[in-house]
Image (cartoon, rainbow, N blue to C red):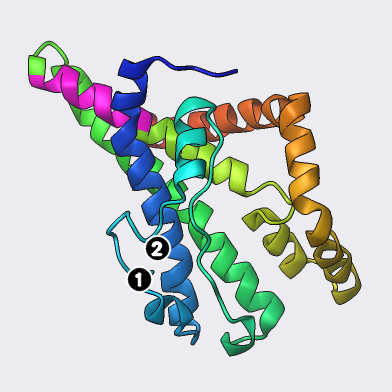
Amino acid sequence: MFDLDISRILISLPAIMIGLTFHEYAHGRMADYLGDDTPYYQGRLTLNPLPHIDWLGFLMLMIVGFGWAKPVQVNPYKLRGGVKNGMMLVSLAGPAMNIFLAFLALIALRFIYPLQGSEWAQYAIMLIEPLVWINLVLAVFNLIPVPPLDGSKILAGLLPNRGASLVYALEQYGTLILLLLLVTGVISKILIPLINVLYLLLANIVFYF
């Protein structure tokens, strides 16, 4: 499960920093757009990675493949459109940003792959390919509908009020459920096929259209 390949970690480092930073920035920017200035006053509307990094989650992502950043704090009662819809949009912004970054990285690869005979192109590919996969992992992992992940708030926003209340009631057990899914390997069995499907979807759009 643990991979302490230093060269792999170093190559993945820029992609991890970018993926985590933009994910949290997107949460904060969406909350700010919807009327909540909490992320602004907490210094989270920045692309400087330091305010966004949770160092334990950062190390876990590098070594294990699953990790987290420092959550953006949001006051749901300040969000336009109501608590449920507002939180759904704020939560959706993070994974959506990661998918967008993976899409941009694939576009870059489309133009660089034909040039991979040159040394600079090989280095560029080495750095950009992890940007695709790290962002896909972050997107799909965070879309799992288990608190405290983004997917739980997205699901709550889509459900009627009674269903949303059930999702919110799971928050006190969410971390335990998530750890159980990780330890038993259930998450890997679910995520890997979903990540591959999302990759194929984006790759088909980029390389065949």
| Residue type (three-letter) at the residue carrying disc 2 | Tyr
Q: Position of residue 63 (x, y in %)?
A: 48, 26
Image quadrant containing the C terminus = top left
Question: Residue at 44% across / 45% down in the picture?
Answer: 55
| Residue type (three-letter) at the residue carrying disc 1 | Leu
Q: Position of residue 109 (x, y in %)?
A: 26, 29
Extent of the magenta region: 120-130
Find disc 1 in the rendering and name its residue.
45
- N-terminal of the pair, mark 2 or mark 1, is 2
Q: Secondary structure under badge 1? A: loop
- Can you name the residue that lies furthest to the top here? 117
Decide: is 184 above or below 155: above
Taking depth in this image into account, of 172 and 169 the one nearest to the observer is: 172
Task: Please rate how many residues cluster around mark 2, counting C-alpha atoms within 10 Å: few if below 14, some from 14 to 19, many from 20.
Answer: many
Taking depth in this image into account, of 201 and 143 the one nearest to the observer is: 143
Find disc 2 in the rendering and name its residue.
25
Q: Position of residue 208 (x, y in %)?
A: 38, 29
Examine the residues drawn in magenta and state their main secondary structure.
helix
Task: Evaluate if marks 2 and 1 touch, with contact meaning CB atoms under 8 Å apart.
Answer: yes
Magenta span includes 147: no
The quarter of the picture where residue 82 lies is bottom right
